[in-house]
Image: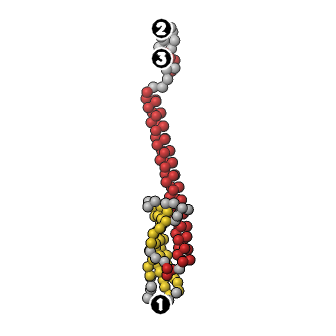
Amino acid sequence: MGHLLDRGPAGRSTARSRRGRGFTLIEVLVALSIITIALTSIYRLQSDTVRMSTDARFYTMAPMLAQEKLAQIEREGFRFAADGTGDFGQEHPGYGWALRIEDAQPDLIKNPKHHLIRIDLVVTRDEEKSYALRTYRFYVE
């Protein structure tokens, strides 16, 4: 009579038995593709978050360490300061510094006891990231 469902030998619908068998291969592959795309996106997002957190930590610590080194140079006296490299010890493992000091005597300073120096200080972390600071200091002997 125009029924879309075929009847089996016992008079049961074959469509009902087809539904009970499970998912087709295409359905499983589509589901796996969607899960793969979602997990890949989540992994990339997580790795970007970790990288940004590491960068933020460095760019927060580096200026503080640079200021600490400049304060140490000021305490010891500018005339005793010299170029050099070093690290920040056990408190900040992996962080290092490089210092370069030059006289920046402009023509306007006529008194030989007055000095203007340029200080270039670079703070590094595991030689991968670096933070550069340039400042000028004036002192009198």
Q: Residue at x 49, y 23 (%)?
A: 22
Q: CA distance from mark 2 to mark 1?
A: 115 Å
The mark lying in front, picked from 3 and 1, is 1
Q: Which of the pair 3/75 is nearer the observer?
A: 75
**Is residue 1 in view from this perspective?**
no
Q: CA distance from mark 3 to mark 2?
A: 16 Å
Q: Amino acid at mark 1?
A: Pro
**Labelled disc at residue 123:** none
**Labelled disc at residue 4:** 3
Q: Residue furthest bottom?
A: 110
Secondary structure at badge 3 equals loop
Q: Amino acid at mark 3?
A: Leu
For marks 2 and 1, the one nearer the N-term is: 2
Q: Which of the pair 88/113 is nearer the observer?
A: 88
Please name the residue that numbered disc 1 is placed on. 112
Please name the residue that numbered disc 2 is placed on. 9
